[in-house]
Image (tube, rainbow, N blue to C red):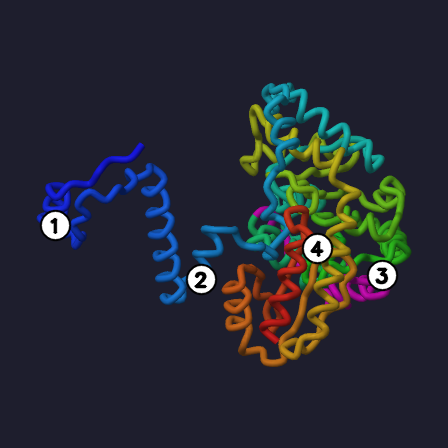
């Protein structure tokens, strides 16, 4: 196990520039293999320390423990069980309507909401844009909230894809009311105005801080739309967050809407995909529009399976995200840096800083502590809880808020 160190060995070491004392007949252990590993570990620590002194703490956190990512609930990754379910999916050609997993997902979702049919698409923007295209014609007008996703975050798609314009309403926290809609219906016999052709709601409202529509208000809006012979569309990107909070039966909730877009890749945690729901004739036409928009997919069952697993397993756990968001709300309300926090109803936290000019600085401090959030305009910041945020992450974030002050 041990060798005797000789004078010759000592001279050789010295000749290579290593300052080593001649140990004569002293017994020294052979170098162990793990010393190389330890040296590499030490070098890694040195490198990390250098990065600290170079103000690169973000890279270090990402490298060692990963960031706590509150930027959106779209950042979730499929878990082991979901991935296994996806890898085992039966596949076919969905353009020929022969992918059994896609068909199962569509049937499952349609039945869940009591609608006749559903269409699997790549994104919520696509499902919204397909619905708008079917409900309107060029020169028509869509009524929606000024902060709605279809108006603010879909790249001008209403105008580009459907040749329609928008009439936006400034309602409270992303909501519009029936008595506000009636003020903006254009007279059909006046050629100076575009024809009002669609009303669209968003539930929950992203820009409204995850606010949930009062279902009685939805019913009033539907009643008025029916009187005006206007279809009613739902951008339900986070509709499950609303349904978990309002405890309305899914089928009852869906009844007022002529079309519904639901997202699978936010709170439900699927890697990709949304569904458009409606009656059979509407979905038949939607399939053609999806093709025109370049959305026809072939062996799509491998991603549809993620959505199917999400619907079957991840709806009711969303309540945990809401609880976590309320913990952050409470902590932010104690912070000296925060002017106000929008009342948290679901999984979105929007807070305004005392100094609107310090948003970048505040985000940088969070990032230094291993936390990512999103600037939200007007001196505000958004944080979104989701299934990849765990109890320990909330504790760490609350501690970070305290440290920032």
Per the image, label 3 sits on a secondary structure element best described as helix
Q: Nearer the viewer, mark 3 or mark 1?
A: 1
Determine whether 193 is above or below 36 in the image: below
Residue 377: where, in percent of width, then height? 59, 69
- Report the Cα–Cα distance between label 1 and label 4: 84 Å
Image quadrant in which you'd find residue 37 = top left
Per the image, label 2 sits on a secondary structure element best described as helix
Q: Which quadrant would the C terminus be assigned to in this image?
A: bottom right
- For disc 3, the neighbor class at 10 Å (few under 14, some 14 to 19, many from 20) is some
Give the residue at the far front of this rendering: 25
Answer whether residue 169 is magenta in the image: yes
Q: Is residue 49 left or right of residue 329?
A: left
Q: Which residues are magenta?
A: 161-187
Residue at x 59% of width, y 20% of height: 93
User: First in sequence: mark 2 or mark 1?
Assistant: 1
Which of 329/103 is in front? Answer: 329
- Report the Cα–Cα distance between label 2 and label 1: 40 Å
- In the picture of the structure, the residue carrying the numbered disc 4 is 142
- In the picture of the structure, the residue carrying the numbered disc 1 is 14
Q: Nearer the viewer, mark 1 or mark 4?
A: 1
Q: Are marks 2 and 1 in contact (CB under 8 Å)?
A: no
Q: Are marks 4 and 2 in contact (CB under 8 Å)?
A: no
User: First in sequence: mark 4 or mark 2?
Assistant: 2
Note whether residue 38 is visible: yes
């Amino acid at each position: 196990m041990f060798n005797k160190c000789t004078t010759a060995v000592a001279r050789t070491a010295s000749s290579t520039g290593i300052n080593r004392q001649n140990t004569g007949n002293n017994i020294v252990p052979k170098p162990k293999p793990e010393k190389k590993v330890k040296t590499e570990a030490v070098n890694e620590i040195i490198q990390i320390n250098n990065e600290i002194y170079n103000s690169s703490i973000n890279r270090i956190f990402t490298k060692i423990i990963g960031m706590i990512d509150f930027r959106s609930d779209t950042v979730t990754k499929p878990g082991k069980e979901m991935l296994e379910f996806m890898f085992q999916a039966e596949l076919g050609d969905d353009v020929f309507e022969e992918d059994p997993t896609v068909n199962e997902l569509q049937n499952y979702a349609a039945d869940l909401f009591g609608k006749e049919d559903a269409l699997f698409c790549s994104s919520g923007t696509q499902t919204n844009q397909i619905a708008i295209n079917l409900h309107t014609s060029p020169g028509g007008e869509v009524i929606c909230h000024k902060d709605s996703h279809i108006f603010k975050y879909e790249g001008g798609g209403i105008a580009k894809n459907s040749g329609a314009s928008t009439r936006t309403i400034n309602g409270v926290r992303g909501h519009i009311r029936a008595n506000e809609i009636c003020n903006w219906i254009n007279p059909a016999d006046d050629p100076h105005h575009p024809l009002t052709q669609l009303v669209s709601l968003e539930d929950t409202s992203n820009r409204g801080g995850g606010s949930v529509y009062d279902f009685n208000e939805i019913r009033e809006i539907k009643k008025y739309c029916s009187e005006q012979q206007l279809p009613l569309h739902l951008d339900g990107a986070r509709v499950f967050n609303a349904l978990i909070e309002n405890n309305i039966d899914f089928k009852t909730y869906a009844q007022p809407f002529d079309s519904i877009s639901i997202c699978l890749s936010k709170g439900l945690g699927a890697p990709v995909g949304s569904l458009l729901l409606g009656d059979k004739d509407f979905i038949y036409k939607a399939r053609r529009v999806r093709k025109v928009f370049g959305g026809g997919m072939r062996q799509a069952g491998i991603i549809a399976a993620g959505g199917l697993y999400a619907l079957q397993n991840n709806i009711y756990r969303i309540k945990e995200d809401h609880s976590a968001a309320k913990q952050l709300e409470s902590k932010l309300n104690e912070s000296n840096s925060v002017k106000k926090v929008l009342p948290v109803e679901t999984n979105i936290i929007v807070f305004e800083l005392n100094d609107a000019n310090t948003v970048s600085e505040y985000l940088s401090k969070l990032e230094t502590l291993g936390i990512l959030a999103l600037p939200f305009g007007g001196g505000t910041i958004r944080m979104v809880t989701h299934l990849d945020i765990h109890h320990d992450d909330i504790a760490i974030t609350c501690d970070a808020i305290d440290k920032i002050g």
